[in-house]
Amino acid sequence: MRTEFYPSLSLNFFQLLEDADDYNVTIKVGENQNTQDFRLHSTILRARSPYFKSALSFQWTNNKKDGMILFTKPNISPPVFALIIKYLYTGILDLTNVPGSDILGLLAGSDELILEELFKHVQNYLIEKEAVWLKQNLVKVLHVVSKLANCKQLQDYCYESICTDPDPFFTSEDFPILDKDIFLELIKRDDLEIEEIVLWDHLIKWGISQTPTIKQKDVKKFTVSNFGNLKKTLDPFISHIRFYEISSKDFFYKVRPYRKIFPLVLFEDLVSFLMAEAEPQHERLPARYVDLSESKIIKRRHATILSNQILYKDASSKISKGNKYKFRLLYRGSRDGYDINTFYSKVNGQGQAIAVIKIRNSEKIIGGFNASGWNWNYNYNYSHRYNNNRNADNNQDHFIFSFEENYKIKIGKFVSGTGLYYGHNCMLMFGNGDLTFSGGNGSCNQNSYDQPILDVNRFVAEEMEIFSVQRL
């Protein structure tokens, strides 16, 4: 029978770390006034770290004093190195109350010391437990993780966080010092959910801050030299801006003043397109976001999540190039009223559509995706339609949903019975009562869909909107 006594072993090695007087390695970590000496054992370091196994080989141990091997690690802070050493000696890592900056330093340190097990754990920990801190420090985090070849998971997480909610990132105080390669990677992405003219404004501000010879922000005061230096700074970015998606008014007031940084052929092509609707001669990149400026209920991130659900049957999937949806407002309750005939006159025959409802006195948003589109002829006699199933639609792609805080979504998938009714004295009726709405009031009682979207059966709407959804 095999018995393992790992806790005792870990404790004994911890005592060795704390009390031993037979150490033979001293490592000085940190820099300037923030340094600390760690007295350690070469045998343990060699056994636990491939980096130290090489570093403590005969060829690397010439730096000795009184028989003691001396190392310096200025790029690892003392608190971070203390976490690493405790892990090496005991197999224990406690990140409770450890600042996010030290956890990020631990990630970089574990990569440098080739501690694969620790590196993977810390990367997952940052994503799962430190999401708020990551979002508040994305520029700082990307500066670190973009240099770590094995950190793709966290790199992707950071880029996707920015793409789904870019405003906090671009308006942060650290943004002007953002690394050029990181910004270029972002600006190339098709899933960056930002208006193109807003992105252009941020690019100009960043470019000016990155060009030391420009001492003023007023473009009217720029010298020929200023324009030339700004052109060098921004040249790699110009081809990735979707200028054809910018309105003529915004182009005139915000882009045209910087015409001297453009290739002449590109600028003339843009002017021809905007003024004469001439066919673009340059590649016209697809719009990179969903326009929801008309909505009083949902934001771009809601639309992205719903688009993923429609396209991939998975709300967490990433939308790839060419697979986005255009949301067009068809109906709004506060604008058009809650008369059923008016409702159908607005939404009939418009193709696939999404209904969204903001619940009164709540942050919750609920709704449903009509995969077939509304096609109810309200001039027909209702009983005739009902008896012939002309008002029932069992498209398997119908779904209902609810959003809570932090864009958390719950999806109800159609599984049995009837997916959606037209008419039936209701504006909306998904399933046999799973989501019913008319006249500003509604109810949710699970029946035809695999899970309920509300914890209560009845609700009162603050607002209701219908959008057609068209794949771009």
Image: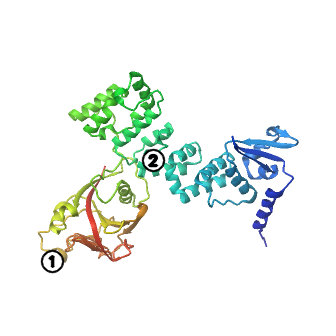
Q: Residue furthest top?
A: 224
Secondary element under disc 2, as helix, strand or loop, is helix
Whether residue 206 is situated above or below residue 5 in the rendered picture: above
Q: Quadrant of the N terminus?
A: bottom right
Amino acid type of the residue tagged 1 in the rendering: Ser
Q: Quadrant of residue 423?
A: bottom left
Q: Quadrant of residue 408?
A: bottom left
Q: Residue furthest right?
A: 66
Q: Position of residue 64 (x, y in %)?
A: 84, 39
Residue 71 left/right relative to 148: right
- Tell me what residue is drawn at x 33 percent, y 41 percent: 197
- Tell me what residue is drawn at x 77 percent, y 68 percent: 4
* Residues marked 1 and 2 touching at CB (< 8 Å): no
Residue count near mark 1 (Cα–Cα under 10 Å), binned few <14, some 14–19, many ≥20: few
Determine the CA span between mark 1 and mark 2. 56 Å
Q: Which is in the foreground here, disc 1 or disc 2?
A: 2
Whether residue 6 is situated above or below residue 213 in the rendered picture: below
Residue 306 left/right relative to 386: right
Circle 1 sits on which residue?
Answer: 383
Amino acid type of the residue tagged 2 in the rendering: Phe
Whether residue 92 is situated above or below residue 421 in the rendered picture: above
Q: Quadrant of residue 15?
A: bottom right
The residue lying toward the viewer, choosing from 435 and 454, is 454
Q: Position of residue 25 (x, y in %)?
A: 81, 47
Secondary element under disc 1, as helix, strand or loop, is helix
Q: Say the numbered circle drawn on residue 404.
A: none
Q: Position of residue 360 (x, y in %)?
A: 31, 69
- Tell me what residue is drawn at x 18 percent, y 66 percent: 376
Circle 2 sits on which residue?
Answer: 169
